[in-house]
């Protein structure tokens, strides 16, 4: 008899749609536990730019992969894949349902579709060689190098996205195309929900969220990280939010320009997320209004889970 696959619910969608809020509400209804699928929430002391759930929210249900690393640490898709898989199986073994919440598309897709990174060459020497090549020849030449190896992946990446281009070349040099390194079947019994809303409403929510981040102390948080000795070259400091504030600190932009650039970068990020999710046809989408009715959304999710016999039928 085939061993039953571990269950997992995923809630994904573009930034600012309220995934964390919805995930917590669903976890409370099901007695579940949340696994963060956001690449930035793993870092301690980085709360405002990452829109990390508050301490009060984190206390409502058990959370995993939140505040587990110092800001100068590195965290890769392989690290996430391994740790999230362990957590899914461990939570299932206790009779609980893990709920994966996050917007880092590659992380969630790599986990649910069991991407195989076993052949990835993690050689620091190779990475250094590629970085030196880009410094010497430019980002266009680096992108051309990827295009010669895997035109599909090259078409997905912007010319100036040096870090991801280098990562893609590393994967290919390890013996397998990034575009094809996934398993034929998911190792999980997964139900994947997606939150979305009209583009204009989403962009307005993003703009309001950035204004709130500034009010909450985004600039002070960035200064504190620098004072702690976190290098500006750290993986975490290159993320949206800190990157724009650092450019203001360096005198490249005024404060108002940095805020406007942050809003634009976040809107562009949401657009890329939406494009990425199109590669995941198994997502069941929920269209939200602004402000969203999360109670109605969670009720619809529970109905869907019951219909799929993922959970027992809910009492009306």
Image (tube, rainbow, N blue to C red):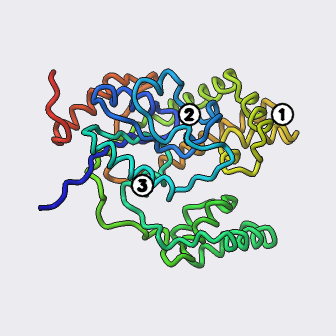
Q: Which residue occupies 44% across, 34% down?
A: 63
**What is the crowding at mark 1: few (fewer than 14 residues within 10 Å), some, or many (at least 20)?**
some
Whichever of callouts 1 and 3 sits on the residue coming sooner in the sequence is 3
Q: Which mark is residue 286?
A: none
Residue 282, how many percent across, how many down? 31, 51
Q: Marks 1/3: CA distance?
A: 38 Å
Residue 50, how many percent across, how many down? 60, 36
Question: In the rendered image, which quarter contains the N terminus?
Answer: bottom left
Tags 1 and 2 touching, CB below 8 Å: no
Q: Which residue occupies 30% across, 59% down?
A: 186
Q: Which residue occupies 53% across, 71% down?
A: 120
**What is the crowding at mark 2: few (fewer than 14 residues within 10 Å), some, or many (at least 20)?**
many
Vertical side of 244 occupied by 276: above or below: below
Q: Marks 3/2: CA distance?
A: 24 Å
**What is the crowding at mark 3: few (fewer than 14 residues within 10 Å), some, or many (at least 20)?**
some
Q: Quadrant of residue 52?
A: top right
Residue nearest the viewer, comparing 270 with 240 = 240
Residue nearest the viewer, comparing 12 with 121 = 121
> Which residue is most to the left?
1
Residue 265, how many percent across, how many down? 65, 42
Q: Which mark is residue 254?
A: 1
Q: Which residue is mark 2?
A: 203
Tags 1 and 3 touching, CB below 8 Å: no
Q: Which residue is mark 3?
A: 109
Q: Secondary structure at mark 2?
A: helix
Tags 3 and 2 touching, CB below 8 Å: no
């Amino acid at each position: 008899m085939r061993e039953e696959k571990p269950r997992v619910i995923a809630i994904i969608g573009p930034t600012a749609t309220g995934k964390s809020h919805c995930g917590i509400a669903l976890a409370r209804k099901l007695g579940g536990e949340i696994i963060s699928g956001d690449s930035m929430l793993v870092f301690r002391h980085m709360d405002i730019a990452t829109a990390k759930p508050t301490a009060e929210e984190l206390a409502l249900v058990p959370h995993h992969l939140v505040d587990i690393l110092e800001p100068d640490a590195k965290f890769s898709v392989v690290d996430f894949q391994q740790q999230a898989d362990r957590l899914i199986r461990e939570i299932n073994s206790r009779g609980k349902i893990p709920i994966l919440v996050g917007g880092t598309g590659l992380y969630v897709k790599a986990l649910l579709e069991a991407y195989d990174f076993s052949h990835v060459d993690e050689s620091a020497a190779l990475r250094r060689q590629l970085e030196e090549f880009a410094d010497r020849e430019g980002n266009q030449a680096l992108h051309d190098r990827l295009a010669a190896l895997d035109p599909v992946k090259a078409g997905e990446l912007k010319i100036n996205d040096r870090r991801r281009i280098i990562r893609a070349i590393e994967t290919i040099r390890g013996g397998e195309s990034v575009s094809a390194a996934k398993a034929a079947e998911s190792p999980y019994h997964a139900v994947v929900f997606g939150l979305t809303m009209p583009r204009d409403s989403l962009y307005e929510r993003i703009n309001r969220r950035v204004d709130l981040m500034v009010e909450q102390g985004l600039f002070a948080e960035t200064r504190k990280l620098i004072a702690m000795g976190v290098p500006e070259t750290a993986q975490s400091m290159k993320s949206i939010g800190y990157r724009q504030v650092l450019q203001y600190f360096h005198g490249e932009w005024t404060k108002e320009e940095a805020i406007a650039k942050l809003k634009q970068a976040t809107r562009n990020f949401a657009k890329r997320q939406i494009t990425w999710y199109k590669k995941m046809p198994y997502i069941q989408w929920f269209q939200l209004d602004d402000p969203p009715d999360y109670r109605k959304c969670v009720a619809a999710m529970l109905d869907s889970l019951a219909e799929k016999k993922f959970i027992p039928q809910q009492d009306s």
